[in-house]
Amino acid sequence: MNKPLGLTIRASACPHDCPSTCALEVEVLDARSIGRVRGAADNSYTAGVICAKVARYAERVHHPHRLMRPLRRKGAKGSTDFEPLSWEDALDIVAERFLREERRLGPEAVWPYYYAGTMGLVMRDGINRLRHAKHYSGFFSTICVNPAWAGYIAGTGRLAGPDPREMAKTDLLVIWGTNAVNTQVNVMAHATRARRERGAKIVVVDVYRNATMEQADLPVLIRPGTDGALACAVMHCLFRDGKADWDYLRRYTDCPDALAAHVRTRDPAWAAAITGCDVATIEEFARLVGERKRAFFRLGYGFSRSRNGAVNMHAASCIPAVTGAWLVEGGGAFHNNGAIFHWDKTLIEGLDVRDPSIRMLDQSRIGAILTGDREALAGGPPVAAMLIQNTNPVSVAPDQEAVKRGFAREDLFVCVHEQFMTDTARMADIVLPATTFLEHDDVYQAGGAQYIVLGPKLIEPPGECRSNHEVVCALARRLGAEHRGFRMSAREIIDETLRASGWGGLEDLEAKRWIDCQPDFETAHYINGFGWADGKFKFSPDWSKVPFPRPTTYVPPADMPRLPDHWEVIEEADAEHPFRLATSPARNFLNSTFTETPTSLARERRPEVMIHPDDAASLGIADGAKVVLGNRRGAVRLYARLFEGVRRGVLIAESIWPNAAFEDGRGINTLTGADAVAPFGGAAFHDTKVWIRPA
Ligand SMILES: Nc1nc2c(c(=O)[nH]1)N[C@H]1C(S)=C(S)[C@@H](COP(=O)(O)OP(=O)(O)OC[C@H]3O[C@@H](n4cnc5c(=O)[nH]c(N)nc54)[C@H](O)[C@@H]3O)O[C@H]1N2
Ligand SMILES: Nc1nc2c(c(=O)[nH]1)N[C@H]1C(S)=C(S)[C@@H](COP(=O)(O)OP(=O)(O)OC[C@H]3O[C@@H](n4cnc5c(=O)[nH]c(N)nc54)[C@H](O)[C@@H]3O)O[C@H]1N2
Ligand code: SF4
Ligand SMILES: [Mo]
């Protein structure tokens, strides 16, 4: 009998793409197995709380479907017909093919492609060292943060804000476009404290009555892509009712008079017509903001995933600059803390061998790129070979039909390094088995909190699994790629990177488990000025000057609003497509991760679309009926759920189910568009017009 040797509790970090980056405590049962996972109680942001899906991580790490051996495709692309081979043979095949394509078409024919399956700095970003050393095609990451970050930085000049723990010290928490109960549960723990200890009110702005909105004192239910109108109307009321802090405005902002004049015509009636939210709710929202200076705006990603998303994010971030909420603890606008960590990633990413003249290919436009769109290829050679780590584009990328056509190309060679046989791995020529965060060393940085957290190797990898770093180094040797990082261990890289970034070394971090990187109050609240040269918050940003790294080809459109507004570039419903679809996150999945664990699957049941009962009645759709959603990009078959908590004309499909969960293998991203969101790229996942009919 296998008996646990005796349970030890070890410290770790959640590796997933979630703003919280929880500090974990893992029950280690023996050299190869774990038990329960808990949140560290003495970490001030995690505060002992983690989501259910990670608490039962043992299900994922010890899952019988974990990939254990390298595989080579035998059958047609997309079939499940693979045969095992040795690591040496698998790596040789990949390297030979990369070298062959490099000789034939130049190094830009190889496109390393990755994302955030793990957020560990070494395992996620190390693939860039190989790319830079080999002068392979560049990777412009756009799928998640670009519209949100660009929109936030447009105002503040910097991606940082008040200490996220101040959510517990506010009088008014505005949770805007983030379904925190699903996506970052810790926000709710801090919100609950503010309510209990200070009588704080909670406002939730979203496009359906989700679990977060259920907890709101004031639910603000709007149509997707209309947040700019809502923000303008709130500011209209603040100026109208004498709630604007003119001392603050004159000292800290660029053009308060122009803003006041601009929003004078954008009253609640105007916004009600655009947002679908009634005038009384908008007035009540403004009244709360006006009366409670200590107002904390927790701005999420969801409302930025529209074609006008950056403008809407900027508009929402303007509200606390009107009231001067930034001046007080528990006040201001928080989105992400990216700027406080000042990482030096030279070693991890091989930035010292980077050639900036090499083309950048847009992650979200992978369908267009693989199907040979000249503009998407930036005039360069076709992509002939790929190494994919940490991401599942055949499921998560927009314009799925194009993505699938691209991956089906017989002349495209694909190596996928994965933990599971995902939709993307199925399209690979070579599949390599990957470790999980419990089986390798890495360091993590929070986006929605202020910690750097260590995640050391706690158990041995199952089967023949190898880490991303090991694979990158083994390929580098075969490809003749030169960089000292390829000869270092993950621990050595972590140590040197921490030191170069000013965070002490690995030994320090091992002792402390995490580092609290929160800047002082004056810095975090921009008391000494915002992140722009003149120190002023920008109500009127020059979008082309927003400091966000991007290829020179990404230029803001000339008609981007210069002041907060409703920008009418969303995919509005029309006669043929009377509905607007948002593909909001499911609670028990994390993007396409956890779509393999039994309890997550049991709780999510099946792919569904929420529809207002009156809309359903007018179309003859019954609760639980099979329906088809469609537009010019394709059609998707799933089940209807009648739900009063959406506006008429709006549909919500919680995502992201594997493509195979749908009757004909077409996943939800069959419907979403890959046209780049202004100003610097991104995918408008919640901005899709569709028709719906009974199947
Ligand atoms: N359980 C779970 N957790 C996750 C994820 C997951 O898939 N599942 N994904 C992870 C990742 S990668 C990220 S980036 C974060 C993202 O987490 P969030 O910041 O929460 O962003 P989204 O997940 O895109 O959407 C959040 C909410 O925005 C709403 N929304 C959509 N369109 C609009 C709009 O136009 N206006 C407004 N006001 N609201 C809108 C959606 O309905 C949804 O309820 O979550 C992470 N955590
Ligand atoms: N319709 C719709 N589509 C969306 C979104 C949406 O809201 N709606 N959200 C978008 C967003 S915000 C994002 S961030 C993207 C996310 O898209 P992805 O980054 O592709 O995220 P996941 O689907 O979680 O896939 C991550 C994969 O990495 C693997 N992985 C984890 N750790 C490791 C490791 O250490 N090594 C290797 N080699 N592999 C590992 C996991 O097994 C998993 O299959 O999806 C986007 N797609
Ligand atoms: S809440 Fe987010 S960071 Fe925390 S354990 Fe869950 S997925 Fe990980
Ligand atoms: Mo994301």
Image: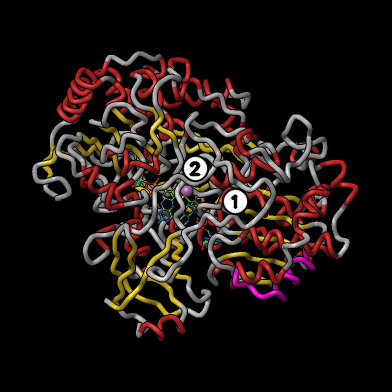
**Region in magenta:** 275-288
**What residue sits right under mark 2 in the picture?**
12
Sequence-wise, the earlier of marks 1 and 2 is 2
User: Residue placed farthest to the left in the image?
Assistant: 74
**Which of 336 and 40 lies nearest the eye of the viewer?**
336
The spot of residue 43 in percent (x, y) is: 62, 47
Q: Give the Cα distance between marks 1 and 2.
A: 12 Å
Say whether residue 297 is magenta.
no
Label 2: which secondary element: strand
**What residue sits right under mark 1 in the picture?**
46
- Dot 2 alpha-carbon crowd within 10 angstroms: few under 14, some 14 to 19, many 20 or more: many
The amino acid at mark 2 is Ser
Q: Which image quadrant is residue 235 in?
A: bottom right
Residue 189 falls left or right of residue 682: right
Residue 398 visible at all: yes
Residue 50 visible at all: no
Residue 1 falls left or right of residue 258: left
Say whether residue 277 is magenta.
yes
Task: Give the dominant element type of the magenta stretch: helix, strand or loop.
Answer: helix
CB at mark 1 closer than 8 A to ligand 3? yes
The spot of residue 345 in percent (x, y) is: 51, 25
Give the residue displayed 29% in from the left and 42% down from the top.
418
